[in-house]
Amino acid sequence: MTTLLVSQRNFESHITPQNHPERPDRIRAVNEALAQPRFDALMRRDAPVGDLLLAELVHSPHYLARLRAVRPAEGIAQVDPDTFISSGSLDAAATALGAGLSALDAVLLGEADNAFCAIRPPGHHAEIETPMGFCLINTIAIVARMAQRKYGAERIGIIDFDVHHGNGTQDIFKDDPSVFYASSHQMPLFPGTGAASETGVGNIVNVPLEAGSDGEAMREAYEGKIFPALRNFAPDMILVSAGFDADFRDPLAQLNWVSEDFAWITGKLMDYAEAHCGNRIVSLLEGGYDRNGLSAGVASHVDMLQNGALRSTDS
């Protein structure tokens, strides 16, 4: 199994206020975790700069103009109560997009079986019209559209295990039967969307989880609802919104997952991808705001991607 790690050189150019949860130190924690000797076999690549005009594949035509208008020449500006933009934020967002597109190319051209992108800012809350929830552009949605546009993929499956519902990804694809979106998330919690009744055109599966629930509840959700729906949809490839804020240490939520839970989900997705879509998985970092929880979750996720040691187990 060949796993590509695409990392982002200019992640620090997206500046947020002091003590903001979505801070540059998140990527430092990820990089430190993936510098361990057990990850020496990873194929590593620096993210190129992506073309932000591709945002128009999923966002409204005036979306980028709005971001550019609020972006300050120096310092930090506020997009909404939780979301900020600095002078270098769009450069960081473009490189995050470049990471996703580079990973997509590598996996669909056969250079790697799967890939993980260590990027910021996150993207899954960015809606068609509205940046929000720390997110400026919806990176994973653009990658999904490029898989269809550039490589002719007919059916894309997106699995989102961030503790917060990916309202932006759902908003973009809710009327599109060619893209499947499934999310497990704590509810009630920001952004307030993601009820089980939100099903799009039959392509959306939401499994809300109660505060305090653990890996057992997560396994029931995936085995009982998400994985059967994924198998029924039969995607050509799988994209993952990989948030690690369901970890028991995370300050913004109250789920009680441990690192083995992230490994379990990853292994199950690998089982499906191996059987049905040539191992093709591209995973993009979303949330995760406790340094130790984030680094442990990412390490378990990437270790599974490159080794698959726990696949098909229930541990």
Image: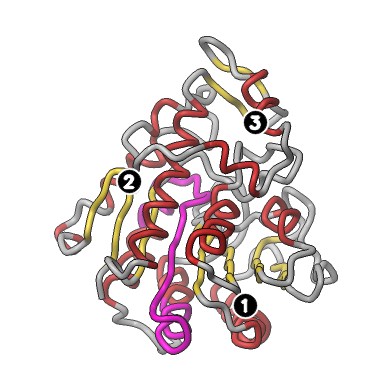
- State the CA–CA distance, disc 1 to disc 2: 32 Å
Q: How many marks?
A: 3
151 part of magenta stretch: no
In primary-sequence order, the first of circles 1 and 3 is 3
* Picture quadrant where residue 144 is located: bottom right
Task: Identify the residue at image location x=19%, y=55%.
Answer: 36
The kind of residue tagged 3 is: Leu
Relative to 77, say whether 49 is above or below. Answer: below
Mark in the foreground, 3 or 2 = 3
The kind of residue tagged 2 is: Ser
Q: Quadrant of the N terminus?
A: bottom left
Q: Which residues are magenta?
A: 267-296
Q: Residues within 10 Å of mark 3 (few under 14, many from 20)?
A: many
In primary-sequence order, the first of circles 3 and 2 is 2
Identify the secondary structure beneath mark 2. Answer: strand
Q: Residue furthest right?
A: 197
Residue toward you, 250 or 63: 63
Mark in the foreground, 1 or 3 = 3
Q: Are marks 1 and 2 in contact (CB under 8 Å)?
A: no
Q: Position of residue 30 (x, y in %)?
A: 34, 48
Q: Which residue is mark 2?
A: 7
Q: Position of residue 91 (x, y in %)?
A: 46, 29
Q: Which residue is mark 1?
A: 217
In primary-sequence order, the first of circles 1 and 2 is 2
- State the CA–CA distance, disc 3 to disc 2: 24 Å
* Picture quadrant where residue 195 is located: bottom right
- What scheme was used to colour the molecule? secondary structure
Task: Identify the residue at image location x=48%, y=65%.
Answer: 151
The answer to whether residue 248 is visible is no
The kind of residue tagged 1 is: Ala
